[in-house]
Amino acid sequence: MSAVTDRRAATPARARPKPWLWATLAAVLLLAVGAGLALRGGKPDAAAADKDSKLPAGPMELAAADVAQIEQRALTRRLPLSGTLRPLVQASVKARVAGDLLAVQVREGQAVQKGEVLARIDLRNLGAQFDAQRATLDKARADLALARVNRDSNARLLEQKFISQNAFDAVQSAFDAAAASVKVAEAQLRLAQVGVDDAVVRSPIDGVVSQRLAQPGEKVAADTPLLAIVDLRRLELEAPVPASDVPAVKIGQPLRFTVDGYRERTFEAVVERINPATDAGTRAIRLYLSVDNADGALKGGMFAQGDLLLDPSAPVATVPAAAVRSDAGVPYLLVIENGHLRRRAVTLGIEANDGAFVELRDGPPVGTPVLAARIDSLQDGAAVTVPASAAR
């Protein structure tokens, strides 16, 4: 029996998979899947993402604050103005007579009163002229007295027929000439008196000395500028405006303005005059506004900037400025129609109420709801829902 060989023992056994081999294959598959996901950043494939993006999205619910309506509104507009402040009353004090300047009694920045002595000019020549004219008047009066005596005497002789009428007429003519000489002498004496008075230079207005143009010891001629005086209690603001804005400007409209150095303080002015012609170069029209400066805070030459408050316009179609959008410079609105946003081109007018509203000269009718909020995800055609309070 030992010599007989069992065939099952001689035949090789069939290979069977080992359990550890199955575990290894499963681990390799898991690693391959993980590597593929890592290469795609853990995101689903493009086809799946595109499929999801094409799913219909629901309408966006808007808040009441996101919606506005086109309304009729009276707009209050502000016109920006700028210009230089100048004293409304100012005077250039000049020498009225020629002579040596003896004294200048004031300096720049000094307040003066009307009639106050500012300077004195040498009176010696003027005094001599005055004395000469007074002597001439005395002589003329003496000649007139003599001519009067002669006329009266000859009048009695004429009554008694001792002289002819022609002789009396000659005496009467001499009397008339003497009377005229007295009047001429009196006028010349008054002129000499004016010269003496003008040698004392007085202030023509209440104000402040802004310039001192001559010094003591100088020889001045008539009309030589001596001093400049300004009255700072009333200033004038001269400001150019475009001719297209002038129809909205009226006398008495208020202006609030600021100047450098007084940034925390606001001043007021009132339109007082409007120039009837445009400037040749700029085609602008100048406005003249009066400024009450009783405290003297403002000075001549300061630069003022402000806004002129114009009268409210007649009611016009308006929309909040925040609702206006622009594409390549073309303004448009996103109006809400049948639960969707629709783009509508518009023509704008003036901005008013401190830029909060803008006039619609051409566009959707009054009462149309528009999107006022800046929501970038909402574009033409987007579905939206509007609260009942905003739909009214």
Image (cartoon, rainbow, N blue to C red):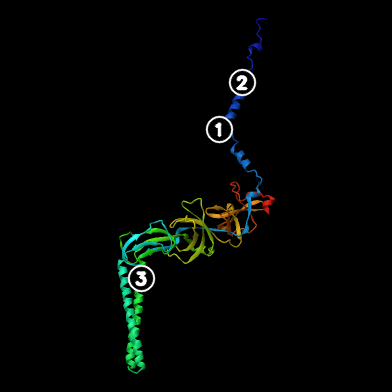
Q: CA distance from mark 2 to mark 3?
A: 140 Å
Write down the residue under mark 2.
Answer: 21
250 on left or right of 219: right
What residue is disc 1 on? 39
- Front residue of 156/136: it is 156
**Amino acid at pointer 2:** Leu
In the image, what residue type sits under mark 3?
Gln
Quarter of the image with the C terminus is: bottom right
Rendering quarter of residue 147: bottom left
Q: Earlier in the sequence, mark 2 or mark 3?
A: 2
Front-lying residue, 211 or 300: 211
> Residue at the location (32% across, 62% down)?
101
Quadrant holding the N terminus = top right
x, y percentage for residue 244?
A: 51, 63
In the picture, the disc for residue 193 is 3
What SS does tag 3 mark? helix
- Earlier in the chain: of badge 2 and badge 1, it is 2
Q: Nearer the viewer, mark 2 or mark 3?
A: 3
The picture places residue 281, in percent across and down from the top left corner, at: 42, 63
Q: Secondary structure at mark 1?
A: helix
- 298 or 114: which is nearer to us? 114
